[in-house]
Image (cartoon, grey):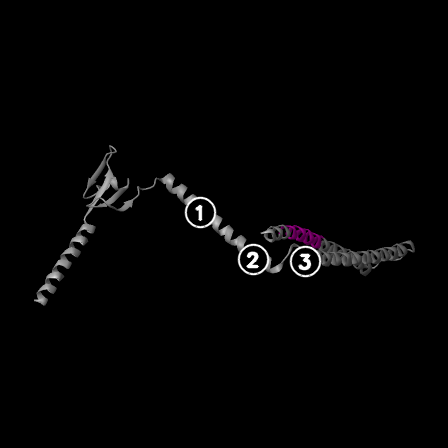
Amino acid sequence: MMKFWLRYLSCIFGLVMLSQSNTVAAELYRYKNEDGVTVLDSHVPARYVKNGYAMLSLDGRVLEVVPRALTEKEIRERDRRLAEEERTARDKREREIADQNLLRLYSTPSDVIRARDAKIASIDGMINTQEGNIQRLENQKRQQESALADIERSGGVIGKDRLARIRNIENRIAQIQSEIEKKQEEKQGLVTSYAADLRRVKELYRK
């Protein structure tokens, strides 16, 4: 007797599950035709698929909504918006990484100022040294030119080695002047860079 009831209950349970499965699987499709009239049907004609439709259960519950196909203009606008969002997110990530690196270097705005002043002082020292070298070379050049003038006044012949010596001094002066210009550009770049770092550290320090 017990076995009979177990088989009976098993059959009832199977019928209930089958009924639920069929209910979920059974669907209607809701869409609008070319006249704008809402239609319920067992399928969506191919010409209406691009306009979007909804899948319904037999009891009227919405199972899924398939949106209409986008126009080319809408696709371009969507892609533009997604690209802009991606660019904004990337800029934000890069800014956060830059801020983290900045705070590893400087704990306070005063740290930025000290680092800036130390760098600039180092560059100024190099420039001063090179300017001193130029003055020394210009003195050497004047001495060589004075010696050549004495030779000419006395009717002597100026050797090529003396002329080459002066040209070498002039070339060295030009080279040092170029190095000084590069250091001055480097100094200006540092001033600009440290100004940006100082401004950002002040902003982060206030947070």
Residue at position x 77%, y 59% in the image: 129
First of labels 3, 2 by sequence position: 2
- Crowding at dot 1, Cα within 10 Å, few <14 / some 14-19 / many 20+, comes out as few
Kindly give the residue lying farthest to the front in the view shown.
Answer: 1
Alpha carbon of mark 3 to alpha carbon of mark 2: how far? Answer: 18 Å
Q: Position of residue 181 (x, y in %)?
A: 71, 52
Residue 45 as seen in the image, left or right of residue 168: left
Name the quadrant containing residue 170. Answer: bottom right
Give the residue pinned by disc 2.
Answer: 100
From the image, state whether disc 1 or disc 2 is nearer to you: 2
Taking depth in this image into account, of 157 and 144 the one nearest to the observer is: 144
The amino acid at mark 1 is: Ala
182 drawn magenta: yes
State the residue position of label 3. 115
What secondary structure is found at the residue carrying circle 2? Answer: helix
Gap in Å between the C-alphas at discs 3 and 1? Answer: 39 Å
Report the magenta residues as a range.
Answer: 181-196
Which comes sooner in the sequence, label 1 or label 2? Answer: 1
Q: Report which residue position mark 1 lands on.
A: 83
Which residue is situated farthest in the right direction here? 154
Q: Nearer the viewer, residue 182 or 53?
A: 53
Q: CA distance from mark 1 to mark 2?
A: 26 Å
Neighbourhood count class around disc 2 (C-alpha, 10 Å): few under 14, some 14–19, many 20 upward: few
Against 84, residue 186 (above or below) is below
Q: Quadrant of residue 101?
A: bottom right
Q: Position of residue 6 (x, y in %)?
A: 12, 64
